[in-house]
Amino acid sequence: MDKSEILKHVDHTLLLQTATWEEIRQICDDAIKYQTASVCIPPGYVKQAEEYMQGKIPICTVIGFPNGYMTTKAKEFETKDAIANGASEIDMVINIGWLKDKKYELIKEEIRALKAVCGEKILKVIIETCLLAEEEKIKMCEIVTKAGADYIKTSTGFSSAGATFDDVKLFSEYVGPNVKIKAAGGISSLEDAEKFLLLGADRLGTSRIIRLMKNEETSGY
C-alpha cells in the first residue's frame, strides 16, 4: 500500500497533558504537508488550531477523555463547545463502568445524545478494548451500531494497551455496515498501519507514522 494512501487514513494525534501550542502547531503543519485525514488534539486547542489552519485539515477532538465516566450532560456540553470552536470530528469515551454493570441502554442513549449534537459531523466511540472481555467488545459493536455513531474506536492510548489486530478483526465481524473502525494506540510502523487497514480499519490514531516518515526524509532513505 502506498504511503500516501496510508496517510489518508491517519488522524495525526497529540493528546499529551503537557502539549503546548508550539507542539500542536507542528502537528497541524505536518497534517497539512502529509495530507492526513485529520488532526486529533485536546479541546483547549481546537479554536486556535481552526484559526491557524483555516479549514485545510479537519480537526478532531476528544470528549470525556480519557476515562469516560463523566455525566452525559457534561459530555454533551463538551461536544457542543468543541463543535462551536471548529471541531468537525468528535472522539468520545464510553462510561466503561456502565458497560461492566450491563447498563447498555444508558450507553446507547449517551451515544445517541452526542450524535444528535454532532449532526452531520463525525462521531467516533472509544470503547477502550484493553479493559474489556471479548463479549463486552461484541456487545459494544452492537450498541454503537444501533446508536448511529459513525465509528467504533479501540483505545484512548492512555490505558494499559492500544489497538490490536485481533480487536480490529473482531470489530469488522460484528459492527453494522454503517459503522467504520478506528484503530488507535501503539501503531508504530507503516507495516502495522497497513495491516490494520487491510483488516478493516478506516482510521488510524497515531503520531508515530509521520515521525517515521520525517526521520526517513532526514536520513535520506
Image (cartoon, rainbow, N blue to C red):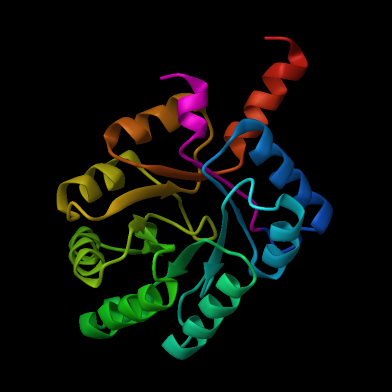
Tally of numbered discs: 0
The residue lying furthest to the top in this view is: 221
Give the residue at x 17% y 55%.
176
**36 relative to 129, above or below:** above
Q: Position of residue 119 (x, y in %)?
A: 39, 71
Residue 207 placement: quadrant: top right
Q: Position of residue 61 (x, y in %)?
A: 57, 63
**117 relative to 49, above or below:** below
Residue 186 in magenta stretch: no
Q: Nearer the viewer, residue 161 or 138?
A: 138
Give the residue at x 53% y 85%.
77
Residue 126 placement: quadrant: bottom left
Give the residue at x 44% y 70%.
93
Give the residue at x 43% y 71%.
118
For the C terminus, give its image quadrant.
top right
Q: From where the camera sits, is residue 102 visible? A: no
* Left or right of 130 in this view: 169: left
* Left or right of 69 in this view: 65: right
Residue 49 placement: quadrant: bottom right
For the N terminus, give its image quadrant.
top left
* Left or right of 137 in this view: 69: right
Task: Point out the stretch of residues depicted in magenta.
Answer: 1-15
Q: Nearer the viewer, residue 157 or 142?
A: 142
Q: Nearer the viewer, residue 180 or 51?
A: 51
**26 relative to 196, above or below:** below
**198 relative to 205, above or below:** above
Q: Position of residue 47 (x, y in %)?
A: 70, 66
The residue lying furthest to the right in this view is: 22
Q: Position of residue 72 (x, y in %)?
A: 42, 86
Q: From where the camera sits, is residue 163 visible? A: yes
